[in-house]
Amino acid sequence: MILILASDIDTGDAEYKRLLEHLDNLPNVSHRVHREIGTQSVVTEIYLIGDTSGLSENDMNALPCVERVVRVSQPYRVLGRHRDDHRPSYFEYQGLRFGQDTLHVFAGLCAVDNREHVEQTMRAVRDNGLQCTRMGAYKPRTNPYSFQGHGKDCLPYVFELAGKYDIRVIAMEVTHDSHVEEIREALEAAGNPTGVMLQIGTRNTQNFELLKAVGRQQDYPVLLKRGFGISLDESLNAAEYLASEGNRNVVFGLRGMKTGMGDPHRNFVDFAHVPAVKRLTRMPVCIDPSHSVGTRHASPDGIMDMCHVTAQGVIAGANMVLVDFHPEPSKALVDSAQALRLEEMPMFLEDVRIAREAYLQRAQLVGGNAA
Ligand code: PEP
Ligand code: MN
């Protein structure tokens, strides 16, 4: 059960103390307070954990400071969509809204290789009207002898150039909690010219200690990639780990599954789950066509498979597209086979625009609100 308190509650207030006292005395029920400090107001929610079946919604509604009561009907307490749950399905970061009703394209390098390529990519991102990019500095690799990213050494020029090209948010994978501090220090040293969305990769979806560490900080939102060999429920629970530690600014990323039957693609594309994740949770949903498809092959209609699956995800309501571009794909140190060329960015974005328009029309057709 979730108690949603009246906005801007003062935790020093006598009424608030009375409420906590009452909750402390409930048998076999513990509680956890979550406070969300937004730009407009502070939202306080109290999660009741344990045997709440005997609690009446009316009684709980009558407690001091309580505005609304939501009975948890999904295992994902914080991020799930429960019955009569009107909590928001968006968050704001760096002046941008990330929600189940918005769409952002994060086009950029799978892995940072050198300053020149970062600059060329960011210039193209800016010139194509985008404000977000992807820049991998810490790369988890299957083969221990493969290039694993430049790590913190590349952060100073990545952040400096992001400032130069008005990039608001960079998606960047972290594979260890120390990377969050390295990113924080580098951002501060550069004068905070941009923001970072921390990415948890598919190989770390169930790295619970990493999830807890990243969930404990609330400065950076998180893009959690679905685990490529586990159930959707397990991956949604992984997202809930982040939220249960305090960070609910989470985007859920679909990137294809290792089924052994994905060929001719790198992974079996799972973008049909975009609407399912939006139904089960309040998270915006990202699709990653690059890591799903993994090649630049095109069908006889001339459209690349990567563009086809992007359109399929967007027409189903995806809220974010994470896609690999490179100035010279053949020279990319990681995933060169799947990078799009910078000259292809206008075509890619126009294709996304067409699919988004079609999605909005489809939602209108059934009287929905695309949110
Ligand atoms: C990536 O986005 O660079 C990446 C490694 O993705 P995934 O974790 O989905 O393989
Ligand atoms: Mn990659």
Image: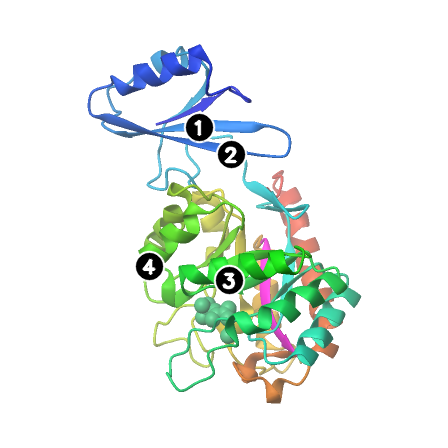
Give the amino acid at mark 1. Glu
State how far apart marks 4 and 1 are (Cα).
26 Å
Give the x, y percent position of residue 359.
Answer: 64, 52
Circle 3 or circle 2, nearest the eye: 3
Between 167 and 356, the one nearer to me in the picture: 167
Give the x, y percent position of residue 354.
Answer: 71, 60
Choose top left, top right, bottom left or bottom right for residue 128.
Answer: bottom right
Among numbered discs 3 and 4, the one appearing first in the sequence: 3
Can see residue 165?
A: no
Q: Which residue is mark 1?
A: 45
Q: Which residue is mark 4?
A: 206
Give the amino acid at mark 3. Glu
Q: Which residue is mark 2?
A: 36
Callout 4: SS: loop
Give the amino acid at mark 2. Glu
Circle 3 or circle 4, nearest the eye: 3
Q: Which residues are magenta?
A: 319-326
Q: Is residue 167 left or right of residue 32?
A: right
State how far apart marks 2 and 4 are (Cα).
25 Å
State how far apart marks 3 and 1 are (Cα).
31 Å
Is the residue marked by circle 2 packed among few (<14), some (14-19), or many (20+) residues within 10 Å? some
